[in-house]
């Protein structure tokens, strides 16, 4: 089952409440009382509640963080593309639990000398998981790279049971999930999933060469899972590629895992066939296969540290194409 995630990226730099302007970064709050809210403070002073925060760097909109947990990045001056959410999992009784939301964010008064914004905040799915010590580093974007670094620890707020029956489809706990659109070769935001499937050593006496198997799955507008038999990550990267500038130059999104360890992660995704060009019918995620099946209330579930890189369209090297 794929729960269709948020829609198209809202146009950055839309009218909003100015929260921070340091000459490089401009952060505005978007008001919408019908949407999930983010409680915002700026340099420890309460600034109100907003449905989203829009980040612009030197006049270019590059990021939207929404109260529903959506992370919507783009390159400076670039087109919108895939988005991301955090921490969805299958509950034994309640089914697929919604993503972690940005319930509170603290903005600094300004960026550091090198242009980096350090955000603090709180995540919660308003059901079973919470993190009071979210850290996000928003690095100054370059024309060909924009990087976000995340760090947090999740704690249970009630007794937790993760559905082990979902292990067969690698979706019991989705650390990060990308949402994208694919209708056809001439109508999509992303079109290929990449990960390093295997490392092998080919040795002759004391001379060894490393052989890498880079697995790729081309997206199609057909209902089904992206990988038939995915293996654990053999590098830190899981990448949702846009391989060309057509039909629009929407970016590639790359996840780089640190915690949990990449060897504890399997890639997977699912496509739901659609004819609606505005619908995000593709989900691609990093499944934490070593997550504990049950936890009592008020216990640590895990620590998480990873990077999201926003990159220009590019065609990767693929050693094997998989169903």
Image: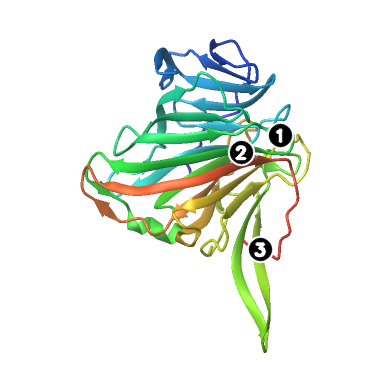
The disc placed on residue 214 is 3
Query: Residue 273 location in percent, x, y?
Result: 59, 44
The answer to whether marks 1 and 2 mark residues whose Cβ atoms lie closer than 8 Å is no
Q: In this view, does 142 lie above or below 168?
A: above
Residue designated by label 1? 142
Q: Residue at x 74, y 34 (%)?
A: 143
Number of the front mark, 2 or 3 = 2
Quick one: quadrant of the C terminus?
Answer: bottom right
Q: In this view, does 116 lie above or below 58?
A: below
Query: Residue 15 location in percent, x, y?
Result: 59, 10
Query: Residue 314 location in percent, x, y?
Result: 75, 47
User: Residue 24's quadrant in the figure?
Assistant: top right
Q: Earlier in the sequence, mark 1 or mark 2?
A: 1
Residue designated by label 2? 147
**Residue 1 visible in image:** no
Cα gap from disc 2 to disc 3, whole angstroms: 23 Å
For numbered disc 2, what is the local secondary structure?
strand
Label 1 crowd (10 A; few <14 / some 14-19 / many >=20): few
Cα gap from disc 1 to disc 2, whole angstroms: 9 Å
Q: Earlier in the sequence, mark 2 or mark 3?
A: 2
For numbered disc 3, what is the local secondary structure?
strand
Residue nearest the viewer, comparing 182 with 44: 44
Residue nearest the viewer, comparing 53 with 121: 121
Residue nearest the viewer, comparing 245 with 138: 138
For numbered disc 1, what is the local secondary structure?
loop
Q: Which residue is drawn at 63% across and 77% down?
A: 201
> In the displayed image of the protein, which residue is found farthest to the bottom?
205
Q: Is residue 225 left or right of residue 174?
A: right
Label 3 crowd (10 A; few <14 / some 14-19 / many >=20): some
Q: In this view, does 24 lie above or below 141?
A: above
Q: Which residue is drawn at 43% across and 47% down?
A: 304
């Amino acid at each position: 089952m794929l729960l269709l995630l948020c829609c198209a990226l809202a146009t950055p730099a839309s009218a909003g409440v100015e929260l921070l302007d340091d000459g490089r970064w401009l952060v505005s709050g978007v008001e919408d009382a019908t949407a999930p809210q983010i409680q915002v403070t700026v340099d420890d002073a309460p600034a109100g509640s907003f449905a989203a925060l829009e980040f612009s760097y030197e006049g270019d909109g590059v990021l939207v963080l929404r109260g529903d947990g959506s992370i919507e990045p783009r390159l400076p001056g670039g087109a919108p593309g895939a988005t991301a959410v955090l921490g969805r999992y299958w509950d034994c009784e309640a089914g697929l639990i919604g993503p972690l939301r940005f319930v509170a964010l603290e903005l600094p008064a300004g960026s550091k000398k090198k242009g980096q914004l350090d955000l603090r905040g709180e995540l919660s799915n308003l059901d079973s998981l919470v993190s009071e010590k979210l850290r996000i580093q928003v690095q100054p974007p370059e024309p060909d790279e924009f990087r976000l670094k995340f760090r947090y620890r999740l704690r249970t707020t009630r007794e937790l049971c993760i559905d082990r029956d979902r292990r067969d489809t690698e979706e019991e706990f989705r650390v990060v999930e990308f949402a994208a659109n694919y209708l056809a070769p001439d109508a999509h935001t992303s079109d290929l999933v990449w990960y390093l499937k295997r490392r092998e050593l080919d040795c002759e006496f004391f001379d060894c060469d490393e052989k890498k198997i880079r697995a790729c799955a081309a997206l199609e507008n057909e209902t089904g899972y992206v990988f038939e038999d995915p293996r654990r990550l053999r590098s830190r990267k899981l990448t949702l590629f846009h391989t060309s500038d057509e039909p629009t130059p929407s970016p590639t999104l790359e996840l780089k895992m640190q915690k949990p360890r990449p060897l504890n992660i399997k890639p997977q995704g699912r496509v739901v066939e659609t004819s609606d060009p505005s619908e995000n019918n593709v989900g691609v995620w990093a499944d934490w296969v070593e997550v504990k099946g049950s936890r009592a209330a008020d216990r640590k579930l895990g620590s998480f540290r990873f990077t999201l890189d926003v990159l220009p369209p590019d065609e990767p090297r693929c050693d094997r194409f998989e169903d």
